[in-house]
Image (cartoon, coloured by chain):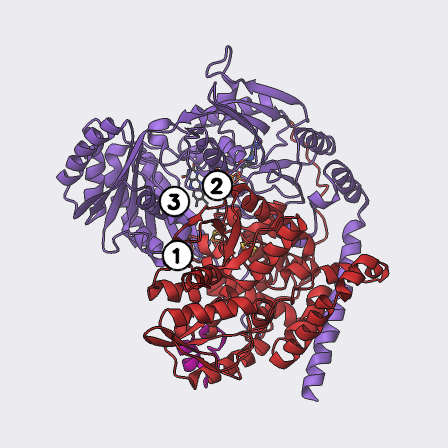
Chain colours: A purple, B red
Amino acid sequence: MARLLVYYHAKFLSYFRRAWEWCFLVSSLAPGAAARFLDELKAIVGEEYVYYHPEDLLVYEYDGSIDRGLPGAVVLPISTDEVRRVMALCYREGVPVVGRGSGTGLSGGAIAPPGGVQISFSRMDRILEVDTENRTATVEPGVINLDLDNHVHKFGYRYAPDPSSQKACSLGGNIAENSGGPHCLAYGCTTNHVLGMEVVLEDGSVVNLGGTARETPGYDLRGVFTGSEGTFGIATCITVRLLPLPEAVKTFMGVFPDVDSACTAVSAVIGHGIVPAALEMIDALSIRAVQNVMDLGYPEDAGAVLLIELEGLQEEVEEIGIEVEAALWESGPTLVRTAEEASDRERLWAGRKGALGALGSLAPNYYLVDGVAPRTKLTEVLREVAAISERYSIPIANVFHAGDGNLHPCLLFDERQPGALETIIEAGAEVMKVCIDAGGALTGEHGVGLEKKELMPLVYTDEDMDAMRRVRDSFAPHNRLNPGKIFPDGTHYHPPARRPEPGLSI
Amino acid sequence: MAEQQTQLLANQPQPVVPPGSGFRGDDVPAETDMYRCVHCGLCLSSCPTYTTLKVEPESPRGRIALMKAVNEGRAAINPTVVSHWEKCLQCRACEAVCPSGVPYGRIMENTRAQVLSHGMQSEGLRRMSRMFLRAALPHPGRLRLGAHLVKMYQKSGFQRLVRASRFLNVLPGGMAALESQLPDFTGPFFGPSKTVYPARREKKLTVGLLSGCVMPLMQGSTMDATVRVLNRNGCDVVVPVGQGCCGALNVHSGDLETARQMARRNIDVFRATGVEAIVTASAGCGSTMKEYDDLLKGDAEYADSAGYFARMTVDITEWLASLPIDPPVSSLSRRVTYQDPCHLAHAQRITAQPRELLQAIPGVELVEMEQSTMCCGSAGIYSMIQPELSGQILDRKLDNIVATGVEQVVTANPGCMSQIERGLRQRGLSHPVTHVVDLLDEAYRSEDGG
Ligand SMILES: Cc1cc2nc3c(=O)[nH]c(=O)nc-3n(C[C@H](O)[C@H](O)[C@H](O)COP(=O)(O)OP(=O)(O)OC[C@H]3O[C@@H](n4cnc5c(N)ncnc54)[C@H](O)[C@@H]3O)c2cc1C
Ligand code: SF4
Ligand code: SF4
């Protein structure tokens, strides 16, 4: 009897819920202007590729950062023409637009402004052409960085910029953020590898920037566009430069008792006049996180580990390799080992590239501060970061591109704890100030986005920022593209996490 | 510059969700598991549904975000949310690549349990659960009877008649489509004629064999091969009577209570045998059995023995590779490709052993296909509940198989075997699709002179 009661009770609840949802569904379609607008969007990209149900929008409210914001609608076009028409429609209706690649950004760049339309490029993922003669590839913006790299490997080439998120992030997002990666120490960031692109402007008009050559006459507009964080236009077709695959690759792992000695080793390597292809540091906390999830061969008792990669001709790599080992040994390591086997190297890199994600095994959230410090001041800056960590009682993990001083202190926290987010943002700002005071910069590679816009005045004067706005205005005079990013406006909003009421989750 | 923006979409009505978590009861996805996801997106490219449909709601990250939203009282368990969860194959590819170690399989199983207890399963799954998962699977007798009937239908020529007449096409309810999905029961059934199959060489160990539910009926010959290969390598094989289905399909569909009953039965039956390991030739079963401890952690009486059972469970490839096996001497001269079953590669992280065994057979050349660890779309009852998406996923798998130019496909799970075989036949291709142990058995048998 009791079971029957429970059964009918559950049944009744589910019918009730369904009726309720049905009412909601109908009402969501009712408001005239919005419904007409949505219909027009559907007419362009197809019914199936416009999301506006609240549950579907929920999965487009985040990127890789701690910011959140529900879009008004999400559209998933498949061609430049569809993008162009969507943009023209939004322009006509005065609706702000934000592009979204894979949503791995770490500065909230792809978070939609309230009521905005998010254009997601996950369906525009074709590699259109690989031109081995001119060493270029032409792709749609949704192509995943690693997919392009793997594809051109077949022809003996590579796409050099390799953000740690390369398995997931899109070329469109890479261009918008001017992304870097471990191997950018030797080869430069995204901007050094983009040759040209087709761009849809805010009013729906289409322009071409750059071309297929490395230098084009006149202003370098593709250079200006790269790193514009989705505020100038939407890239719908991108031509990039390819590099030949190196003949030999060798990776060294230096294990150090503490961060200080690892920093000394960084200076020692660079001091020897060596420019490795990559030079990365992973501290004890990050190692713990990585090894927590999977054994990738990192020593768990180390204070810090350096990963150094050399690439080039066989002989060159051998020769410089000896110097690297010597430089490492000078700085008091506990172990130096080389990985020549591809599988061994891949394991080490999998650890490095998975390190950020692995932090999830230590705490539910991390706030990554993408500050840059001069390489010569690494030791002091990291000491101060450690002091901030202590002062606020916030664990901070460091895993970063040591070669070019691009720090990534990650502040670990649980957003569900009351007040945690506010404390983290305060501590993060302090970390940023330490970098800037040391003569560094606000962002190495993740962009300003939502996350760091209130910190801009730390580095730029009002005149500087006005000049930047004027550049933007020449691309997007109505500021309809990704508004609310980059420049401080006092509106930075972190939606409070809603913790379920303990009493109610029976 | 004037920044005129309208608020066209800003005032869309928001759902009213009751406050507090939408999950209730004991079987809820744990917060410590869900909030391990830092939405980094590194799992997207491994997900079969995301790479096919290319939209975030059909990605691991999206599905977890919806779980968090329900947990935080920001969304209800409603048909839209459920449809995204139900499109998940539970292949656990995302779990294997997640740098943060999100135990996706576990949280999705508990999420499915919530969907079930809220009465929100889709019609297709509800019907399948009632007819098959609860009425048939836990009852080996009923299964065998059903299989005999289908076998008669298939062998008597009646099936050919029905198909030729296109009679089913006029019946409502997609009968023709359902009929075309009928598993093939025409092979011999594995019916243990005795409970102990003695080792053929010097005896080293005694192992128990899970005979399971549909595998002895659909892939009876593979079960026979498993026993022969174990015997050939010095193992007494005990097939205890009274055992039943492992409960994997019930776990995956969220019917944890039925699964627990099935687990308890198997634990009791195997406990009585005193074997040194419990071997299974089905990757899907192995992964569930290795997680019996998780399933029964709230059961004071069974928790310990479930842990013991889980530790005793080994996949046949894992077991044989650890022995190690006597390498067969006669050569098979064959080019094969290996499909990694999801529940072996992702859930049990076993990828090297099956390849080692294949390479131990003289003359066998292993040609790797692209994305061998990507799901084939079978995923238990998924192919019947989501035939369209399953078909798209299968298509990509078949393309990758065909591109290798091999003569035979080898895998290690009954579900994958039938799915790939069906797909190949529909394309008019005749590659044999077998289990790793089938190939080993063939090599041993040709060495013994047939
Ligand atoms: C684990 C992890 C590791 C990371 N490691 C690195 C690293 O090593 N180096 C690094 O630089 N970054 C790193 N990132 C940050 C991030 O991956 C990069 O910023 C990446 O380029 C974002 O690409 P996306 O496709 O995810 O873009 P999204 O996050 O979707 O969007 C980023 C910005 O690009 C804009 N955008 C997207 N597509 C277009 C387009 N077609 N046209 C114009 N604008 C567009 C969006 O509007 C948004 O402003 C990491 C992130 C994670 C989660
Ligand atoms: S890889 Fe793991 S942490 Fe990252 S989005 Fe996927 S499930 Fe979440
Ligand atoms: S289990 Fe498989 S289908 Fe489901 S989200 Fe993970 S990768 Fe995708």
Q: Which residue is mark 2?
A: A107
Element under disc 3: helix
- Cα distance between the residues tagged 1 and 3: 45 Å
- Identified at 36% across, 42% down, the residue is A408
Q: Where does residue A470 sit, x and y in percent of width and height?
A: 55, 22
Kindly indicate whether the residue at mark 3 contacts the one at mark 1 (C-beta within 8 angstroms): no
Callout 3: CB less than 8 Å from ligand 1: yes
Viewed as shown, does residue A333 lie left or right of B433? left
Residue B290 appears in view: no
Q: Amino acid at mark 1?
A: Ser
- Asked if residue B299 is among those painted magenta in the image, a careful observer would answer yes
Q: Amino acid at mark 3?
A: Lys
Q: Which residue is mark 3?
A: A353
Q: Amino acid at mark 2?
A: Ser
Same chain shared by disc 1 and disc 3: no
Quarter of the figure that contains the C terminus of chain A:
bottom right
Which stretch appears magenta?
B293-309
